[in-house]
């Protein structure tokens, strides 16, 4: 048991997860046990390509 360690880690961690493929990307100090959805680099690139394709189809 180490009380000072418990104080440093108050359990307030923010989990960063890719909303697309579900890959866990990061865990960092932040709001209490919050999960932040974002896109990882791979999925972001996919999304960008899909958007480009939609633009082309739109003409
Ligand atoms: Zn992803």
Image (cartoon, helix red, strand yellow):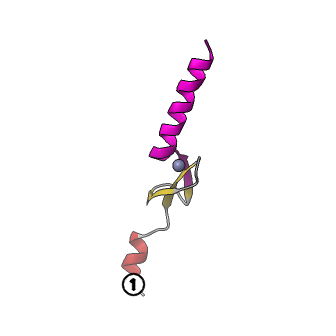
Residue 29 pos. (x, y %)? 43, 59
* Circle 1 residue: 2
Q: Work out whether residue 3 or residue 47 is closer to the camera in this orientation and state it.
A: 47
Q: Is residue 50 magenta?
A: yes
Q: Which residue is nearer to you in this view: 27 or 25?
A: 25
Identify the residue shown where x is 43% and y is 70%.
9
> Would residue 40 appear left or right of 57 to someone viewing this image?
left
**Outermost residue to the right:** 58
Residue at the top extreme of this rendering: 59
Q: Is residue 10 above or below residue 52?
A: below
Does the magenta stretch mainly form a helix, a strand or a loop?
helix
Residue range corresponding to the magenta coloring = 35-59
Image height check: is 2 above or below 13? below
Could you classify mark 1 by the number of other residues whose Cα lies within 10 Å: few (under 14), some (14-19), or many (20 or more)?
few
Instruction: Estimate the x, y position of residue 8 in percent, counting from the top left.
Output: 39, 70
Quadrant hosting residue 57: top right
Q: Is residue 3 above or below residue 49?
A: below
Count of numbered marks: 1
- Circle 1 SS class: loop
Based on the displayed image, in which of its 4 quarters is residue 6 positioned? bottom left
Ligand 1 within 8 angstroms of badge 1 C-beta: no
* Above or below, comparing residue 41 to residue 17 in the picture: above
Q: Residue at x 50, y 32 (%)?
A: 48
């Amino acid at each position: 048991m180490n009380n000072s360690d418990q104080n440093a880690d108050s359990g307030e961690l923010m989990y960063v997860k890719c909303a697309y493929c579900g890959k866990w990307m990061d865990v960092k100090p932040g709001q209490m046990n919050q999960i932040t959805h974002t896109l990882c680099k791979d999925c972001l690139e996919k999304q960008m390509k899909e958007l480009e394709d939609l633009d082309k189809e739109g003409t």
